[in-house]
Image (cartoon, rainbow, N blue to C red):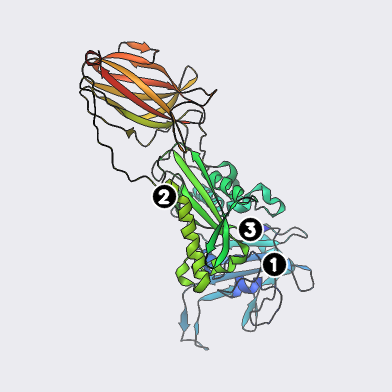
């Protein structure tokens, strides 16, 4: 893992030296759990770098960096570090306990200094590392013998790593950051593995939309009332989607906390790394997803940082006191208030009354995105989700009947003679002639639109396919029992609710 254009690991190479300047080398190579001392710096506890040793089967990493020394001159440094179990050497000329931490470099007295200058570059080159160009600074970390057994091969691991980078650092990858933008690259055995573009990859692009809205001057500010304090910027983005299967997202997305279509709020603070994807209520329809962003105010950065556990993946108000505890607790209260609109209504199903004695009908509806609705591409080796994935299941509205119409499976999207259509299979029960008609309604994020807007094209019946042939009409007469296929003309960028009514002809007359 390497970065370029950063400052490298500078400062003294001895932890027992006092300094008022940089302590990057001391903090990363020698010490664990130091307080952050740089603006927009990362973590503080040391869990992040501990993961590097855990990932190595032999608990060993190499650190190769180019930085500026106290005189302002560029200097390379190289050292090996191992983190293992503590042990004791009793049968030794100098018996003593050992911490399990080891360094490889230039031994001086009772400590180890890094290789420096040309020697560091030569050893790095001999190990296959890309050496620094003149004037270039940065750091390269090498995990020796990584544990990758959960992946089929190195390419699969590379795709997972690329997606994980996107899920946890996407705010830093956006074009609007300009020269401060993170441009990650992943290579596996000499082959580039693409890192997903968060602004063009679902569902990350929904979080990006919310993030960009949260940065606008008129963005909503979540506030604490007592004591009065601005907590952070908040925004939500909603979208009609073709629903994923349960846990249908990638492994990287699931590990991040978003296993399928999002109903989450991304929590972040300075330096805008993702802290957590906070799960909100699922929406009233599987075809509606939402993503939100809460970005804490910089003046409260130390408060939210102190609320994080060592893994930096949550804000826990219980570990704070006083006003700071109130600020973090109120943050989640305000977010939940904003997400309350998505809660499913808990009203009982209405009783069926007042049916005319001479009629018999049955309504079943399926909700499906129209063929022109935006696709949701995914990156990596997983199979992308195309527009022909069916809904999780029909949404039913029932009444008493003796000649029922039953939807078979979920509606699907396909083409017929180049025209995108919604196809719904159904069976007509009972015996005798039945008149079939379809009720087609456009669904929006805010509810149902029974009438199309002025100038808009409403959805319509394309045709019915029956054993007796195909019929291009709004109503179709069939002889039950029979199997029928309904074809519906879709409307771009909408969700269509398809309901079918069956009336026994002899009773309807």
Is 106 situated above or below 162? below
Along the viewing direction, whichever of 378 and 77 lies nearer the viewer: 378
- Gap in Å between the C-alphas at discs 3 and 1? 16 Å
Mark 3 vs 2, N-terminal side: 3
Residue under label 1, please give it. 120
Whether residue 308 is visible, yes or no, is no
- Gap in Å between the C-alphas at discs 2 and 1? 54 Å
Mark 3 vs 1, N-terminal side: 3
Q: Is residue 63 left or right of residue 335?
A: right
Whether residue 301 is visible, yes or no, is yes
Which of the 4 image quarters holds residue 201?
A: top right
Eye-nearest disc, 3 or 2:
2
- Gap in Å between the C-alphas at discs 3 and 2? 39 Å
Q: Secondary structure at mark 2?
A: loop
Q: Secondary structure at mark 1?
A: helix
Residue 499, percent from left and from top: 35, 26
Task: Name the residue rendered at 54%, 52% in the picture.
Answer: 293
**Are dots 2 and 1 in contact, CB under 8 Å?**
no
Residue 81, percent from left and from top: 57, 70
Residue under label 3, please give it. 2
Which of the 4 image quarters holds residue 296?
A: bottom right
Residue under label 2, please give it. 281
């Amino acid at each position: 893992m390497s970065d370029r254009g950063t400052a490298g690991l500078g400062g003294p190479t001895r932890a027992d030296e006092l300094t008022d300047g940089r302590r990057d080398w001391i903090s990363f190579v020698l010490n664990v759990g130091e307080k952050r001392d740089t603006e927009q710096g990362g973590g503080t506890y040391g869990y992040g770098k501990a993961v590097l040793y855990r990932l190595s089967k032999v608990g060993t990493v190499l650190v190769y960096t180019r930085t500026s020394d106290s005189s302002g001159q560029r200097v390379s440094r190289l050292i090996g570090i191992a983190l293992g179990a503590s042990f004791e050497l009793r049968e030794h000329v100098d018996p003593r306990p050992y911490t399990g931490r080891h360094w490889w470099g230039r031994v001086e007295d009772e400590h180890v200094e890094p290789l420096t200058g040309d020697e560091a570059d030569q050893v790095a080159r001999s190990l296959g590392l890309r050496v620094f160009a003149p004037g270039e600074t940065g750091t390269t970390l090498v995990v020796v013998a990584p544990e990758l057994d959960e992946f089929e091969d190195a390419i699969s691991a590379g795709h997972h790593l690329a997606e994980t980078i996107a899920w946890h650092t996407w705010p830093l990858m956006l074009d609007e950051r300009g020269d401060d933008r993170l441009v990650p690259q992943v290579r596996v055995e000499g082959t580039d593995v693409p890192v997903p573009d968060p602004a063009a990859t679902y569902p990350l692009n929904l979080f990006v939309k919310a993030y960009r809205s949260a940065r606008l001057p008129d963005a909503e500010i979540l506030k604490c009332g007592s004591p009065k304090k601005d907590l952070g910027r908040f925004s939500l983005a909603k979208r009609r989607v073709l629903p994923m299967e349960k846990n249908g997202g990638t492994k990287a997305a699931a590990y991040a906390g978003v296993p399928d279509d999002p109903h989450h709020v991304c929590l972040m603070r300075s330096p805008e790394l993702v802290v957590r994807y906070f799960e909100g209520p699922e929406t009233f329809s599987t075809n509606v997803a939402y993503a939100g962003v809460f970005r804490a105010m910089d003046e409260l950065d130390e408060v939210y940082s102190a609320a994080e556990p060592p893994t930096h993946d949550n804000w826990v108000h219980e570990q704070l006191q006083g006003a700071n505890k109130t600020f973090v607790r109120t943050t989640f209260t305000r977010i939940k208030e904003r997400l309350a609109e998505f809660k499913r209504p808990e009203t009982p199903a209405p009783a069926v009354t007042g049916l005319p004695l001479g009629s018999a009908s049955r309504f079943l509806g399926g909700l499906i995105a129209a063929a022109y609705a935006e696709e949701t591409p995914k990156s990596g080796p997983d199979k992308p989700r195309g527009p022909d994935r069916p809904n999780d299941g029909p949404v039913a509205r029932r009444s008493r009947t003796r000649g029922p119409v039953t939807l078979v499976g979920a509606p699907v999207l396909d083409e017929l003679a180049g025209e995108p259509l919604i196809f719904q299979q159904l069976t007509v029960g009972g015996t005798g002639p039945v008149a079939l008609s379809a009720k087609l309604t456009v669904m929006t994020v805010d509810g149902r639109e029974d009438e199309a807007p002025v100038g808009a094209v409403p959805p319509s019946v394309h045709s019915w396919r029956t054993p007796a042939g195909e019929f291009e009409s709004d109503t179709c007469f069939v002889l039950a029992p029979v199997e029928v296929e309904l074809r519906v003309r879709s409307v771009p960028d909408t969700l269509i609710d398809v309901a079918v009514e069956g009336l026994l002809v002899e009773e309807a007359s």
